[in-house]
Image: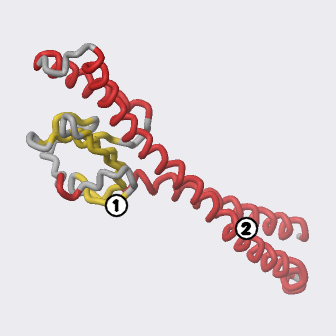
Amino acid sequence: MFNRIFTAILLPVVAVGVIISIWATSSLVPPLLDFIQKRTEASLQLVTHLGLEKCENSFNYLLDLRLEDNRGMVASLKRETLQDIRALNELFDKIQLVVLDGKQGIIGETATRGQEPVIMIDQIDTSGRIVKQVIFNRPARVSAYYFPIWRWYIVGYMYETDYAAPLNMARNIIFGGTFGVLLVVSAWLFVRRK
């Protein structure tokens, strides 16, 4: 009796369910992952560009007041700009910012770390593109701009683990959902036939 139910009903339902699940995941996962990846990269580029805009706006303010030669005002405005750049971190989850001076190294950052950070200035791509790079001894996605007037590098980065987390979550939800529905249907058919 069980063999007849298994071969006549349960096996075809499971086979069709597996085929539909594989098709659904292969057609749903890539567009969703591509969408999430583009949104994450756009956020990383945006926060870095906003950091550059903070520098440009501050310098334009100095020019408007004709105070670009006043060392005290320039130093004060640089400190204020660094605070504004640090505040950008609150708007974007898991994206960190570092401001580097060509001579002094790190002059501002949003992450707090116990270890001495390592960023090689000569290896930074300042075009704003997203590149894979090792930041603070961990693989990361990096976007950077250079503000030549103050010789600042504005570097936005997101560790690979944080970058991949929403992608993995979306993949797991789709896989779990399609195969979960298959298991529920199979169990329902098996219980119903008994």
Left or right: 77 in relation to 172: left
- Residue at 77% of width from left, 62% of height from top? 184
Secondary structure, mark 1, is strand
In this figure, which residue is indicated by the disc labeled 1?
Answer: 132
Mark 1 to mark 2 CA distance (whole Å): 31 Å
The mark nearer the N terminus, 1 or 2, is: 2
The colour scheme is secondary structure
* Residue 11 location (% of width, % of height): 81, 81
Quadrant, the C terminus = bottom right
User: The residue under label 1 is which amino acid type?
Assistant: Lys
* Image depth: mark 1 or mark 2 in front: 1
As shown in the figure, which amino acid type bears the numbered disc 2? Answer: Ala
Where is residue 91 shown, x and y percent of the image?
44, 31
Q: Position of residue 32 (x, y in %)?
A: 63, 57
Q: Along the line of sight, which residue is nearer the eye, 120 or 126? A: 126
Give above or below for 136 relative to 98: below
The residue carrying mark 2 is 24
**Residue 100, quarter of picture:** top left
The residue nearer to you, when weighing 104 against 178, is 104
Give the vertical position of 118 relative to 191 (above or below): above
Q: Give residue 55's quadrant in the image.
A: top left
